[in-house]
Image (cartoon, rainbow, N blue to C red):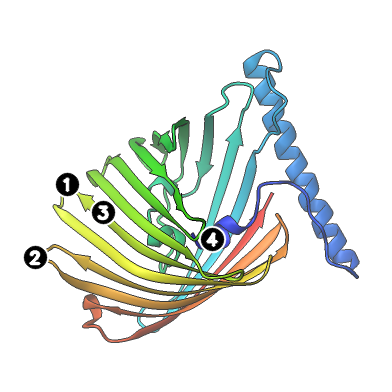
Amino acid sequence: MFWTAGTLAAPIKTATPPPQETDLETDLIQGNINISSWFDSFATGLDLFLAGQRYTTNQNKTTAVIEVGAYLNSFDGLKNDLAFDFNLRLPNVEEYWQVTFTSYDETSERGVAQNYVRNTPRERNPGATFGFFRQLGNVRTSFQPRISFAGTPKLSHTLTFESIAERRKSYHINPKLQFYADAEKGTGTFQAINFNFYLGRNFNLTLVNEGDYIDREHLYTVTNGVALGQWFTKKESISYNIFFTSKNREVYHLASYNLSVAFVQILYENILDYQIQPNIDFSEEHDFVRNPGLNFHLYLRF
């Protein structure tokens, strides 16, 4: 499946700076490494304090990400966004347990809105998510309760089953089933089955098929689309996307479609990367009048 800016960078805390770097670049890289080391030391100390002793030598994969986003389109103008994600790992406490502190509800982002096109800033909803993960054969299972600290504390839950089946090393299938319970939206289910085809060394094609049903609103939203990924180097890639969204209220109909091109570049591996995404949106909300826009995301990783 085509990787976006949020998934291109690995969690290893090392960086290989480009040649002929300036003193400013050296200071920035060293500062990032120092902050990353502080996060690692804090997580390791807390892990050993809670566990009482060291039970595993696995690397602590605690990470922190600061995301700066800008969204510009002809109807809504310019909107800015700043998000923070702190993924705390405690391997000695529990191998498959983790806690994440975020300024938004990351469990509510699903499918295309999470991986390909996000045209609006995230809703401010700081909280903590406790993740429990198990591998059941070929199925990866996760249970993620989340506590929201926005106003009155609220509790939500997400139960996910996901798998990847590879066929003849030429394509793979990625089915996903998710049950969720939200304090405001109520209960719902999300289903997806995506097909990824390898088209050579530098290309792949993903067929996206997903649906999201919200019980309280009796609203079923279906998204179908195609994403063509092209890699120029290990640090530069482009995705050409087209997605169609349909809804069942009042009758099942086409609600919008979006065309976009996303360019991703890693400036410093595991430290700094960005995504630029020009797109054109057509929605029934605006009588399917074209709405050109530009999305920008900058990720600072520790």
Point out the frontmost of discs 3 and 2: 3
Q: Quadrant of residue 49?
A: top right
Mark 4 vs 2, N-terminal side:
4
| Depth check, front residue: 293 or 210 | 210
Q: Give the CA separation, mark 2 to mark 1.
A: 15 Å
- The residue to which callout 4 is attached is 3
Point out the frontmost of discs 4 and 2: 4
Point out the frontmost of discs 1 and 4: 4
- The residue to which callout 1 is attached is 215
| Depth check, front residue: 157 or 80 | 157
* Tag 3–tag 4 contact (CB < 8 Å): no
Q: Is residue 132 above or below residue 285?
A: above
| Depth check, front residue: 165 or 211 | 165
In percent of width and height, residue 2 lies at 51, 63
- The residue to which callout 3 is attached is 212
Q: Is residue 26 left or right of residue 285?
A: right
- Residue drawn at the location 61% of the way across and 33% of the way down: 89
Element at badge 1?
loop
- The tag on residue 47 is none
Point out the frontmost of discs 3 and 4: 4
At label 3, which amino acid type do we have?
Answer: Asp
Q: Give the CA separation, mark 1 to mark 3.
A: 10 Å
Mark 1 vs 4, N-terminal side:
4
Q: Give the CA separation, mark 1 to mark 4.
A: 31 Å
- Residue drawn at the location 71% of the way across and 33% of the way down: 59
Mark 3 vs 4, N-terminal side:
4
Element at badge 3?
strand
- The tag on residue 250 is 2
Q: Is residue 33 left or right of residue 276?
A: right
Q: Give the CA separation, mark 3 to mark 4.
A: 22 Å
